[in-house]
Image: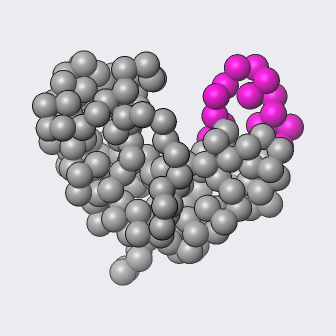
Amino acid sequence: TVEDVRNALQAGADKVSIESAAVLNPELVSEAAKLCGSQAVVISVSPRRVGSRWEIFIKGGRENTGRDLVEFLREMQDRGVGEILLNSVDEDGQGNGYDLEMLKAARDVLTIPLIASSGAGELEHFYDGIAQGGADAVLAASVFHYGKFSVGEVKRYLEERGVCVRKNISPYTLYKGGPLPPRSA
């Protein structure tokens, strides 16, 4: 609910991520962005490739909604969200890299920041998500949880390749650098 979003922000959260509820009740997204500001509303979306397109899955990637990813992203942006967190159900936990084709399709329709998630297994995957996929930020979990890389190693790798990495952020999300203003079309 919008009240849940407000309570999280009042408790100290900078942003609130909405996933299944955004699909089931898109008006919630509009209300939350209007009441709390676009910068506080992040939509987490978990698509899976179905034929020649990506369809939105909810409930932790277990239930297919049949909604087209690209259409959904356009709608969420129009409803005022500040960022999109794109989780590839197909690549999650595989360590084969982000779904670059899906990231590019998302980047083509979005002017707001895009965070790549699901698939990083090697250092070059982080760079590829930004340089090839067009993500504004990259997120990973398993490689850090299981000690394959440290956050510092990933930051150094990206900096060596010319990516400006923010130093004062969550250790699991690495941004291109600087504040994340909306992109121009």
Q: Magenta span has 96?
A: no
Which residue is the extreme one toward the bottom?
A: 52
Q: Quadrant of the N terminus?
A: top right
User: Residue 71: x, y in percent?
Assistant: 56, 74
x 20%, y 30%: residue = 159
Query: Which residues, given as a range, are shown in magenta?
Result: 1-17
User: Residue 96: x, y in percent?
Assistant: 20, 49
Whether residue 7 is visible to the viewer of this picture, yes or no, is yes
The vertical placement of 174 against 25, above or below, is above
145 lies left or right of 160:
right
x 48%, y 36%: residue = 179
In this orientation, which residue lies closer to the viewer: 103 or 33? 33
The vertical placement of 18 against 103, above or below, is above
Whether residue 142 is visible to the viewer of this picture, yes or no, is no
Dividing the picture into quadrants, the one containing residue 75 is bottom right
Image colouring = one colour
Q: Magenta span has 3?
A: yes
User: Residue 101: x, y in percent?
Assistant: 29, 66
60 lies left or right of 140:
right
Dividing the picture into quadrants, the one containing residue 80 is bottom right
In this orientation, which residue lies closer to the viewer: 38 or 51? 38
